[in-house]
Amino acid sequence: MHYAALASGSKGNCHALSDGDRTLLIDAGISLRQIRQRLEALGWGVGAVGGPVRALALTHEHSDHVGALGVILRRTEWVILATADTRRAAGRAQGVEIPAHRWIELEAGHPQDWEGWRVLPFALPHDAADPVAYRVEAAGQACAVVTDLGHPTALVADHLQDLDLLVLEANHDVDMLREGDYPPQLKARILSRVGHLSNAAMAELLHRACSPRLKCLVLAHLSESNNHPDLARFAAEEALRGTSVALHVAHQRDPLALSVVSD
Ligand SMILES: [Zn+2]
Ligand SMILES: [Zn+2]
């Protein structure tokens, strides 16, 4: 499987997964133009490693995840995978409607077949209508993209077992956030049980979820104001001690691409 973080952070999120023949995007919080430019910059154009984008799976309706939805509906033929509540909430937030013929209905906890892939959305604690993360199994490999969650839950940890690639939120360092310039209400929202995952909570989840199969960990959705890549890395390295997991950090502007090969 091939994975790319096209953008990750509070200014826009977009992840791509490909088996070489087709590409699934998870979230589209940067412009369609940027999505295309970044795929091309990574060599994921038509006929190259990624194969054409055919679908977009939505995690939840916050604008840093669905900002390009309207343009995508108008300018592409991509199919949209979303739960019924996220379809409604994202449509309302962006002033568009995802037409029934472009929509594959998902339900949290229920795997969906998409072009021979197994796409499993699972519930997250986050302040949105019906937020989910994704576990995707294709070409004999398992990957998960897990961002925008306020705290680690047993259900989330269960879905992270036996992964080859894990993309996991490391949003903030609690002390940097507490001492930083954000207004008190925003700090409280981020720190809440339905806000964002701190470096420490990420490490705790990793302890519970890291299995011998895991090859790559990508830290994602880092706050530019309340975190530093070195702090997030340090927290993850502690949790990964004694393993040979390759550690990466996804960025807001610079795309990152990885290939996970079977043993
Ligand atoms: Zn977000
Ligand atoms: Zn969110």
Image (cartoon, rainbow, N blue to C red):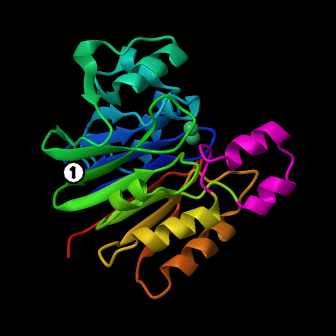
Does the magenta segment cover residue 112? no
- Residue beneath the point at 28% across and 32% down: 106
Query: Which of the 4 image quarters holds residue 222?
Result: bottom right
Which residues are the magenta region? 173-197
Per the image, the residue denoted by label 1 is 20
Residue 149 placement (x, y as % from top left): 54, 48
Residue 136 in the image: state x and y as whole percent.
Answer: 27, 50
* Residue at (28, 48) in percent of width and height: 50
Quadrant of residue 159 in the image? bottom left
Position of residue 161 in the picture relative to residue 129 (left or right)? left
Q: Amino acid at mark 1?
A: Gly
Q: In the image shown, does 195 or 247 lie closer to the viewer? A: 195
Indicate yes or no whether the magenta region holds residue 179.
yes
* Residue 26 is at least partly visible in this image: yes
Q: Is residue 161 left or right of residue 231?
A: left
Closer-to-camera residue (105/40):
105
In this view of the protein, which residue sits in the foreground, 18 or 205? 205
Image point (20%, 76%), residue name: 263
